[in-house]
Amino acid sequence: MFRSMTAYGRAEYRLDDTRFVAEIKSLNNRYRDIILRIPKNYQLLEKDLRAIVSSKIKRGRVEVSIQMEGSGSEAPYDLELNVPLVNSYLKIFNQLAEQFGLDQEVRTESLFQMKDVILVKPEEVELEKVRPGFLEVLRKAIDSLELMRAKEGEAIEADFEKRLDLLEKYLNEVEERAPNLVEEYRNRLKDNINRMLRDVTVDEGRLVQEVIVFAERSDITEEIVRTRSHLNQFRDYFLADGPIGRRLDFLIQEINREVNTLSVKASDSFISKIAVEMKAELERLREQVQNLE
């Protein structure tokens, strides 16, 4: 099953008097990158929360936000005066007053504006009491996200089917054209010789040798076989479990390489034109693959 890396999920869960709200957003990324935002007092739960996300999502940038609402959910804080720092500030103020004749009056609000004069310390919380709420709301949000990822994946798969059918059609046209290349080259070469040397008899033996060399150089059978094999393998991945984005991206690179090679070897305007169309479809496939996990 295809899963898109781009999706959004949201869930709510109530535990006693507290309501937990989780939002999760996933974006394209070559690797897995989890950004987790929870209230500062509950940072010790981060490891467990990350483990849940990692078990479900293997690739992409994942942004998770979990908030608490309701009675008792507000994070309690304890304010503390930083006495040693205040003493140091007052000492400096007195020194300024003595050396430069400044006003010695120090107002309370002035001290409050000094950095770290008031220390904010979160009070200890009962982690085990709220742990089930955090874990459950995250699981529900991921379920919501997975539904959207699967739906987006179905749309991508349908688009893949259409483009793979088109690529196979182009490849069949190339395969039908390939057997005519040698005979057309032979006739073209013979006509050119006759036009340039009207009174000279064409050496059929030498002509055959030239045609054989061209046939060997322009044989694209191997490229056609490999391209068709890669296309079949691409379809096989439709039924694979787990992340497949990187594997499909590699296959597209291989198909593109084969198409380039057969275009150069064939030295035929018709095949070159088809190769351009195939590469355009491959680029569209590549863009879609970037959205897959």
Image (cartoon, grey):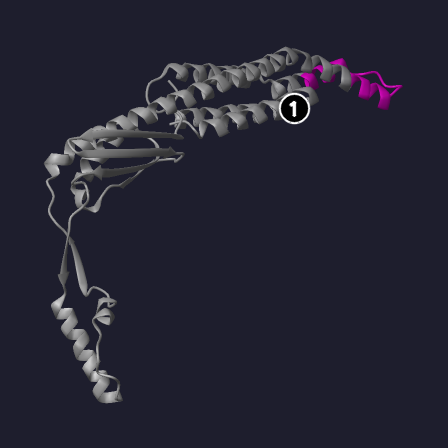
Residue 145 appears at what percent x and percent y? 34, 27
What stretch of residues is rendered in magenta?
Answer: 190-211
Q: Nearer the viewer, residue 86 or 152?
A: 86
Q: Amino acid at mark 1?
A: Ser
Q: Nearer the viewer, residue 118 or 274?
A: 118
Q: Nearer the viewer, residue 217 or 177?
A: 177
Q: Against 5, is 274 above or below? A: above
Q: Against 107, is 261 above or below? A: above
Residue 48 appears at what percent x and percent y? 18, 34
Report the residue at 24% width, 71% height from top: 110
Residue 194 colored magenta?
Answer: yes
Report the residue at 25% width, 67% height from top: 113
Q: In the displayed structure, does residue 61 sit left or right of residue 76?
A: right
Q: In the displayed structure, does residue 139 sit left or right of residue 166?
A: left
Q: Is residue 222 visible?
A: no
Q: Quadrant of residue 58?
A: top left
Report the residue at 21% width, 83% height from top: 104
Give the prevailing secondary structure in the magenta stretch: helix
Q: Against 264, is 63 above or below? A: below
Residue 25 appears at what percent x and percent y? 35, 34
Characterize the local packing of mark 1: few (<14), some (14-19) or many (20 or more) Cα atoms within 10 angstroms.
Answer: some
Q: In the displayed structure, does residue 200 sit left or right of residue 213?
A: right
Element type at marker 1? helix
Q: In the displayed structure, does residue 188 sit left or right of residue 119?
A: right
Quadrant (top left/top right/bottom left/bottom right) for the N terminus: top left
Q: Against 172, is 59 above or below? A: below
Q: How many marks?
A: 1
Report the residue at 16% width, 69% height from top: 85
Label 1 sits on residue: 272
Quadrant (top left/top right/bottom left/bottom right) for the C terminus: top left
Residue 207 colored magenta?
Answer: yes
